[in-house]
Amino acid sequence: MAKEKKDTRARNWMFIVYPDSAPENWRDILSEMHVPWIESPLHDKDTDDHGELKKPHWHIILLFPGNKSYSQIREITLSLNAPNPQKIANIKGMVRYLAHLDEKDKYAYNKADIK
């Protein structure tokens, strides 16, 4: 039986932007793509398993009208000095995660700060 090819394309993608490494105009770079995107509040109160503060970051969601490959999205994240993108399986759940609405063990950010 032939090996199934892993689907590496998706319409919705998420990645993280760090304030200390992103270009100053990172929002302009995203806006110039003319693709809808969503920005979380600045996650500056997240902690790791040891209670230490994590590096401040934003979660960014890109919403494409058609499927895009990992390599196409990786080009975007490289231009923003951002880590590897991830496909989004559940867009509603991911938007809720931007403010940790369903994460009782994490700091709750104001959902009004989602852009």
Image: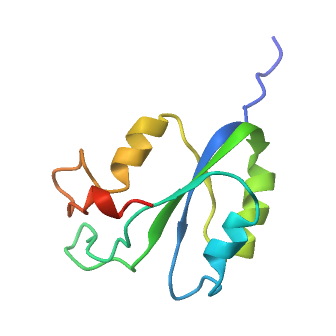
Percent across and percent down for residue 74 are 74, 60
Q: How many marks?
A: 0
95 displayed left or right of 60: left
Is 19 displayed left or right of 23 in the figure? left
Q: Quadrant of the C terminus?
A: bottom left
Q: Where does the image place residue 73, in percent across and percent down from the top left? A: 73, 55
Residue at screen point 65% across, 82% down: 25
Residue at the limit of the structure toward the right, as seen here: 2
Horizontal side of 93 relative to 9 (left or right) equals left
- 55 or 91: nearer the eye? 91
Tell me which residue sits at (62%, 87%) in the image. Answer: 24
Q: Is residue 52 above or below residue 83?
A: below
Q: Position of residue 4 (x, y in %)?
A: 76, 22
Q: Residue at x 44, y 74 (%)?
A: 57
- In the rendered image of this protein, does residue 105 appear above or below residue 16? above
> Which quadrant is home to the N terminus?
top right
